């Protein structure tokens, strides 16, 4: 990070930044991008199936942020607003891919849903964990990300994705089961 | 032991990942963003838009009023102004017969035959254009012989190009038109086909002319190291452009011998899909273009 960026960060609050972007200053645009791109790209990576798709999504997300910035009312922090907007636009993208095939409701696991637990000792690097999440099927991945990492309620997820709550629960359970298997397999390979 | 969701949450929470520089470049280049300037210019644009719509509507109203047919106009002057080209107004006057009239019965005859051979009959009646004496060459004897004899020789005799008279704008124009043998076979398979359909359905499949590979492997093993386009006939004015996933031009060439070897500015390109745009002129002088994707595998 250059000295100018550090100065910019100290000099301007979020409010000044937003006003600057609305007035059409390209420097403020760049500053807003560099301030939030890191966190938002991490989110995009989780929801996408690979880095290339994440890059494509990232472009759409930032264009949307800039186009909707004048609607930001300063009721929450800019970071939180940007995160919500990102997830919403990601969900729109996912919905377009004919998600009905990926969210087939099966009630067979409904009664046996429990917490899936793993050993806390294993220290898995971030890249490996990210790869595990990316390799999940679209439905599992979306529900797992929304529920466990971004903290949505089951009800919210069901209404946002247009499926039933039991579907969300089963998808989540299957996702956790698959992730557990993957982590165990990885740790076994590491020990060898 | 730890719940798996919490485990992932702890690992993912504070993580930031810096996107590559290209992403920002593309966001900057976005057309929507460049045209969008929030509130002020938006209002101005709306004002401009309303102003221009008012202007356009005024001009349209004026145009309609000006060109509205005046029913009180003198009929004799209408005929004089219309001259020879406007046949409708001439036809209403009883003095002269319109010379395009004979075209209609000929057309209806050619359609009414159910025999598919009749649609590609080389002996269709030809009308010598604009004869003042209104003479028609109707080779009725020829026609009957061709239609009754269902020998295969007749269909074999048909050459590739045939002369068919098409009535355009109520005038008979001698216009040669190309009928491929594929078309003829197709026509023969159908039960009923009007003569117009053959003329409006030319088969132009670009893959018959050129072979576009859908993948290549620039790993130096001598097999498919280049993205080489293979033409089946001679092409001229060849152009080839290859773009990457970001839409940036990666490679361009103007000759068929110069092929892309998967290297961009001295650096081997990434594995993945690339989009190509190929333009060329065929033997017959037709300008064609083709878009597609090619997979680069290492």
Image (spheres, coloured by chain):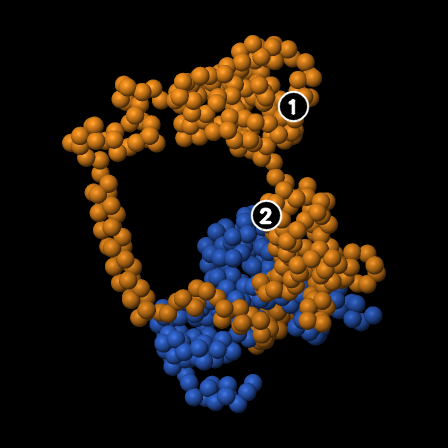
Chain colours: A blue, B orange
Q: Is residue A149 above or below residue B96?
A: below
Please rate how many residues cluster around mark 2, counting C-alpha atoms within 10 Å: few if below 14, some from 14 to 19, many from 20.
few
User: Looking at the image, which residue is at 60% across and 73% down?
Assistant: B20
Dividing the picture into quarters, in which one does residue B220 lie? bottom right
Q: Nearer the viewer, residue A141 or B34?
A: B34
Judge left or right: residue B139 versus residue B171: right
Same subunit: marks 1 and 2: yes
Q: Position of residue A78 (x, y in %)?
A: 43, 75
Q: Nearer the viewer, residue B187 or B26?
A: B187
- Residue at mark 1: B158
Judge left or right: residue B91 versus residue B221: left
Report the Cα–Cα distance between label 1 and label 2: 28 Å
Dividing the picture into quarters, in which one does residue B162 lie? top right
Q: Is residue A77 above or below residue B84?
A: below
User: Looking at the image, which residue is at 53% across and 72% down?
Assistant: B24
Q: Nearer the viewer, residue B281 or A15?
A: B281
User: Looking at the image, which residue is at 61% across and 64% down?
Assistant: B249
| Quadrant in which the C terminus of chain A is drawn | bottom right
As drawn, the label of residue B287 is 2
């Amino acid at each position: 990070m250059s000295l100018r960026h550090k100065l910019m960060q100290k000099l301007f609050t979020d409010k000044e930044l937003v006003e600057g972007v609305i007035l059409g200053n390209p420097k403020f645009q760049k500053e807003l991008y560099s301030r939030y791109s890191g966190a938002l790209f991490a989110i995009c990576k989780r929801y996408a199936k690979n880095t290339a798709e994440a890059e494509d999504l990232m472009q759409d997300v930032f264009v949307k942020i800039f186009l909707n910035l004048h609607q930001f009312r300063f009721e929450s922090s800019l970071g939180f607003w940007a995160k919500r907007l990102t997830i919403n636009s990601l969900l729109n993208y996912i919905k377009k891919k004919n998600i009905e095939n990926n969210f087939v409701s099966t009630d067979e696991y409904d009664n046996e849903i429990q917490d899936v637990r793993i050993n806390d000792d294993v220290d898995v690097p971030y890249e490996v964990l990210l790869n595990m999440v990316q390799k999940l099927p679209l439905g599992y991945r979306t529900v797992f990300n929304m529920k466990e990492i971004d903290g949505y309620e089951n009800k919210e997820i069901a209404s946002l994705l247009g499926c039933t709550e039991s579907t969300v629960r089963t998808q989540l359970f299957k996702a956790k089961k698959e992730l557990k298997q993957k982590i165990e397999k990885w740790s076994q390979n590491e020990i060898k | 032991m730890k719940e798996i969701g919490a485990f992932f949450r702890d690992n993912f929470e504070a993580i930031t990942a810096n996107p590559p520089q290209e992403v920002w470049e593309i966001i900057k280049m976005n057309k929507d963003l460049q045209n969008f300037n929030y509130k002020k210019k938006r209002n101005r644009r709306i004002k401009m838009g309303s102003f221009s719509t008012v202007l356009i509507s005024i001009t349209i109203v004026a145009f309609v009023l000006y060109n509205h047919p005046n029913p009180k106009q003198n009929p004799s002057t209408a005929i004089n102004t219309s001259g020879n080209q406007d046949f409708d107004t001439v036809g209403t006057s009883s003095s002269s017969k319109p010379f395009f009239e004979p075209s209609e019965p000929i057309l209806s005859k050619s359609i009414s035959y159910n025999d598919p051979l009749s649609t590609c009959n080389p002996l269709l009646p030809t009308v010598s254009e604009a004869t003042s004496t209104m003479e028609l060459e109707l080779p009725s004897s020829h026609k009957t012989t061709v239609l009754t004899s269902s020998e295969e020789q007749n269909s074999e005799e048909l050459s590739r190009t045939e002369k068919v008279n098409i009535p355009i704008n109520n005038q008979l124009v001698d216009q040669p038109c190309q009928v491929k043998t594929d078309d003829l076979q197709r026509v023969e398979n159908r039960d009923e086909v009007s003569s117009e359909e053959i003329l409006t359905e030319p088969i132009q499949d670009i893959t018959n002319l050129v072979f576009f590979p859908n993948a290549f492997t620039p790993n130096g093993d001598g097999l498919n190291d280049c993205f080489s386009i293979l033409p089946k006939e001679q092409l001229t004015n060849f152009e080839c452009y290859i773009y990457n996933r970001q839409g940036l031009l990666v490679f361009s060439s103007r000759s068929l011998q110069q092929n892309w070897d998967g290297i961009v500015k001295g650096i081997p390109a990434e594995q993945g899909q690339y989009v190509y745009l190929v333009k060329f002129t065929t033997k017959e002088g037709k300008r064609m273009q083709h878009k597609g994707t090619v997979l680069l595998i290492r």
